[in-house]
Image: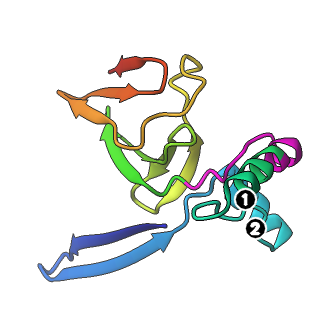
Amino acid sequence: MLHAVYFDKSTVGEWMISYLNKYVNSDTIELERQKSEVEFIPAAGAQPYAILAAFVLYMLRFGKPVKDSANTSIFKVAGRAFAISENHQPYEINVTNLDTIGPYDIDGSWGRPFTSHPKVNNDNLITISEKDALMFD
């Protein structure tokens, strides 16, 4: 879940503070919302064979082994904000209302998960996956 605190100054000079929170509207969150039930059960702490069986069943049912929660990190690059976790590509977020714009794959050039803690250097995004690294500006 994303949380935002907004500070706005009124025309008479008084400060207004507002708070907003929303879930990142990922593919799997939307699926669970439509079905009104939890489809992906957390695997942490389960027996290894149960985790493996769950991953296989999720792949068969949904085409992905785990939920796309985008709940680990938020980063900003090139004037855009993204929410991310290690199991999926980042989701672009509109910071003015926390709406999810959608998954971002760097214009089709990155078809795999990002690291959940990318680095930004001089407004260039540096991300590392299990296979390679990418600098994006």
**Relative to 20, is 129 above or below?**
above
Residue at coordinates 34% horizontally, 45% vertically from top-left?
Answer: 75
Residue at coordinates 58% horizontally, 61% vertically from top-left?
Answer: 44
> In whole angstroms, how far apart are the C-alphas of marks 1 and 2?
5 Å
In the rendered structure, which amino acid carries the disc numbered 2?
Arg
In the displayed structure image, the side of residue 35 where residue 114 appears, left or right: left
Q: Quadrant of residue 121?
A: top left
Residue range highlighted in magenta:
57-69
Furthest toward the right, the residue is 61
Percent from the top left, x then y, of residue 23?
55, 65
Name the image quarter holding the C terminus. Answer: top left
In the displayed structure image, the side of residue 30 where residue 73 appears, left or right: left
- As for residue 125 lying within the magenta part, the answer is no
Furthest toward the left, the residue is 13
- As for residue 61 lying within the magenta part, the answer is yes
In the displayed structure image, the side of residue 103 where residue 115 appears, left or right: left
Q: Secondary structure at mark 2?
A: helix
- The foreground one among 98 and 83 is 83
- The foreground one among 44 and 65 is 44
Percent from the top left, x then y, of residue 19?
36, 78
Contact between labelled residues 2 and 1, with CB atoms less than 8 Å apart: yes
Q: Which mark is residue 30?
A: 1
In the rendered structure, which amino acid carries the disc numbered 1?
Glu
**Mark 2 Cα-neighbour bin, 10 Å: few <14, some 14–19, many ≥20:** few
Percent from the top left, x then y, of residue 57?
85, 49
Name the residue tied to disc 2: 33
